[in-house]
Image: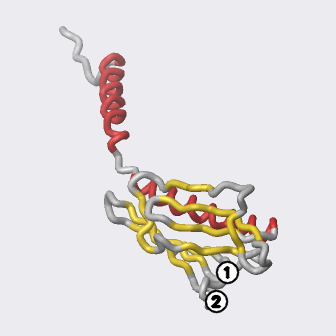
C-alpha cells in the first residue's frame, strides 16, 4: 500500500511564501503615495506657520510668509530707520520651503501675510485690518485638496 500524502511540505510552503513576498515587493512601490504627500505638505505648512508665529512673539520682531505655487518663503523682518515700517533683516536669509512633488498652492498663491510681535496678523499694506488667509494645497495626480486658514488672531485651522 502506498502512503497517501495530504497537505504541503515545508519546502513547498517556503516557495509559496517567497513568491508572495516577491509580488508584494513589486507592488508596494507602485502604490499611490500622493495622498501622503498632500497631508505631509499641509502639516509642514501648518508647523512652519506656527513656528513663525512663535518666533515673532518670542523674538519681538515681525515675520512674513510669502506663498508661491510650489513653495513658500519665510522672512524675518526688522524695524526700518523710520521706526514705522518693517523690512527684510539682512542678517538672516529668507528660508524657502519647497512643497512635496505634485503638490501646489492653488488658493493663496502670490499672497503674503505677516505676523507681528504679538502673534497677530499684521494689517494690510493699505492700512485695512488683517483678514483671514485661506491656503489650499492641491495634488495634481488626483486633484484632491487640503486647506489651512490663518485667522487675524493668528490661530491656524485646517479645513
Mark 1 Cα within 10 Å, few/some/many (few <14, many 20+)?
many
Q: Tell me the SS state at disc 2.
A: loop
Residue identified by numbered label 1: 122
> As drawn, which residue projects farthest toward the top?
1
> Which of marks 2 and 1 precedes in the sequence?
1
CB of mark 1 within 8 Å of CB of mark 2?
Answer: no
x%, y% of residue 74? Answer: 62, 62
- Picture quarter with the N terminus: top left
At a point 77% along the width and 78% down the height, the residue shown is 82
Mark 2 Cα within 10 Å, few/some/many (few <14, many 20+)?
few
**In this picture, is 83 found above or below 19?**
below
**In this picture, is 54 found above or below 31?**
below
Which numbered marker is on residue 20? none
* Image quarter of residue 63: bottom right
Side (left or right) of 46 relative to 16: right
At a point 67% along the width and 77% down the height, the residue shown is 154
Which numbered marker is on residue 127? 2
Distance, label 1 to label 2, CA atoms, is: 9 Å
x%, y% of residue 141? Answer: 32, 57
* Image quarter of residue 77: bottom right
At a point 36% along the width and 30% down the height, the residue shown is 21
> As drawn, which residue projects farthest toward the left?
1
Q: Tell me the SS state at disc 1.
A: loop
Amino acid at each position: 500500500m502506498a502512503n497517501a500524502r495530504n497537505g504541503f511540505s515545508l519546502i513547498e510552503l517556503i516557495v509559496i511564501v517567497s513568491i508572495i513576498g516577491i509580488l508584494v515587493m513589486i507592488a508596494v512601490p507602485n502604490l499611490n503615495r500622493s495622498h501622503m504627500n498632500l497631508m505631509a505638505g499641509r502639516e509642514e505648512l501648518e508647523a512652519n506657520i506656527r513656528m513663525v508665529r512663535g518666533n515673532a512673539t518670542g523674538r519681538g520682531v515681525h515675520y512674513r510668509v510669502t506663498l508661491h505655487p510650489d513653495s513658500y518663503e519665510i522672512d524675518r523682518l526688522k524695524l526700518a530707520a523710520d521706526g514705522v515700517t518693517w523690512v527684510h533683516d539682512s542678517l538672516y536669509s529668507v528660508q524657502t520651503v519647497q512643497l512635496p512633488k505634485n503638490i501646489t498652492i492653488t488658493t493663496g498663491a502670490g499672497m503674503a501675510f505677516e505676523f507681528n510681535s504679538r502673534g497677530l496678523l499684521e494689517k494690510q499694506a493699505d492700512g485695512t485690518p488683517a483678514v483671514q488667509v485661506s491656503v489650499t494645497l492641491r495634488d495634481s495626480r488626483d486633484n484632491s485638496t487640503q486647506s489651512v486658514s490663518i485667522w487675524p488672531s493668528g490661530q491656524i485651522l485646517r479645513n
